[in-house]
Amino acid sequence: MESPKYAFIDSLRGIAIMLILLVHTEQYFFENKIYTFLENGQLGVQLFYLVSAFTLMLSCKSRETEKFFIEKFFIRRFFRIAPLYYLVTIYYAFERYLGFDLTKVSDNLHQLPLIKLITGLLFVNGLYPTTINSFVPGGWSIATEMIFYLTLPFLFKRVRNIRHSVYLFAIALLLSVLFSYITKLSFFNRGGFPMFNFLNQFPMFCLGILAYFIVYDGFSNFRNTEYLLIALLFLGGCYLPLPYYFPYSLFFVFLLVGLTKSAPLFIVNRFTKLIGNLSFSIYLIHFAVLYWVNTVLDFKYIVFSNEFVHWLFYILFYIGVLAISSTISFFSYNLIEKSGKTFGKKIINSLDILVTNRK
């Protein structure tokens, strides 16, 4: 049985990737200035995590009785992520280390950081400070997502109602706070590891699980102790080094829950759903688009006459990067992502046939 399909899920993914593009395009135009709204575009990653956890809980619930539930879950997730990720890994190997002249590849092979490459291909680059975000741009978020995939079947079997999800969120926040002290040590405090590591991001996934139970379980199972725990979590937010995104995460939770009841057109529409469908491809591809656009235009030498012109050029640049990335992603989504999911389904069908033949 397939999980319920909400139109707003794709729209939220579309909003998430458009937020991420804000912070990455801003770095090319406002090098010496900080605009909080643009910088907070990085919160799009946390929105992705929230939506991912919510959607996967739906999927697990609809499939929990099928045979080889865990094996099939991992097959689906691997072939959803790996095919395109491996392809862009090859691209970034040439862009960053090998050059695009095939006649000189053998001469440049010594520049290829094999440890970073291998850990990235195995999706374990997120476990170590010097590899977490060092080969594929933005690869830290993919590694974090894959670690969450490893935990979800275990969590799904044990977190069965809203009360459980509140305690899970509290534990995740506690682990995040405790690990934040460890990442202050010089060995860990590099490569963006304090921000990018899984334990720092884990509470956002747990909020996605909490949002799922708010929608499907409601607050009927809540006790006074759970309300007290939530109050203490907010109090802790005033004094403890909680993740940067914590104050914003509640907005994402209420937004998601609210959209299950009513979906306003300015949020859920054909455009945001289209961008959401292409969001994974856009995420991996837009870094290359930024590289080539900047190579052609070389923004360092552009002088803007005033602030208005500066912002106008930035907006046009943002729209252009989104348009180019989306166009390329349309083909990568249809040719690579869909093919990967289809191949995963074939493996799953082979498992089912194998079980049937053994009977």
Image (spheres, rainbow, N blue to C red):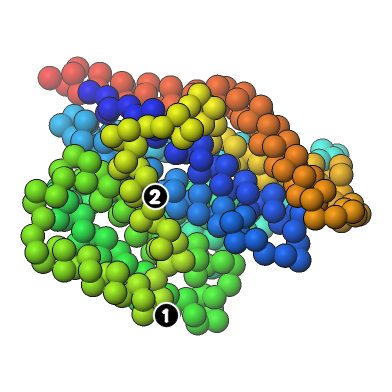
Asked if residue 177 can be seen in this view, the reply is: no
Q: Nearer the viewer, residue 259 or 170?
A: 259
Q: Secondary structure at mark 2?
A: helix
Q: Residues within 10 Å of mark 1 (few under 14, many from 20)?
A: few
Residue matched to label 1: 181
Position above or below: 193 against 348: below
Give the amino acid type for the residue marked by disc 1 in the picture. Answer: Tyr
Residue appearing at x 9%, y 64% in the figure: 224
Residue 279 vs 347, above or below: the answer is: below
Q: Find the distance from the CA under tag 1 to the CA under tag 2.
A: 27 Å
Check the picture and name the quadrant holding the C terminus: top left
Kind of residue indicated by mark 2: Phe
- Which residue is nearer to you in this view: 301 or 188? 301
Q: Is residue 171 left or right of residue 197?
A: left
Q: Residues within 10 Å of mark 2 (few under 14, many from 20)?
A: many
Residue at (42%, 80%) from the top-left corner?
181
User: Picture coordinates of residue 208 (x, y %)?
Assistant: 32, 48
Name the spot of residue 101 as percent of width and height, x first: 85, 40
Asked whether, in this view, residue 109 is left or right of residue 180, the answer is right
Q: Which structural element holds mark 1?
A: helix
> Which residue, given by chain and number where applicable, does mark 2 sit on?
252
The x, y position of residue 69, in whole percent, is 23, 35
Residue 346, horizontal then vertical, whole percent:
37, 21
Circles 1 and 2: CB atoms closer than 8 Å: no
Of residue 104 and residue 31, the one placed in the foreground of this image is 31
| 119 to the left or right of 58 | right
Residue in the picture at 57% in, 42% down: 18
Q: How many marks?
A: 2
Query: Which quadrant of the view contains residue 333?
Result: top right
Vertical relation: 232 (above or below) 116: below
The answer to whether residue 357 is visible is yes
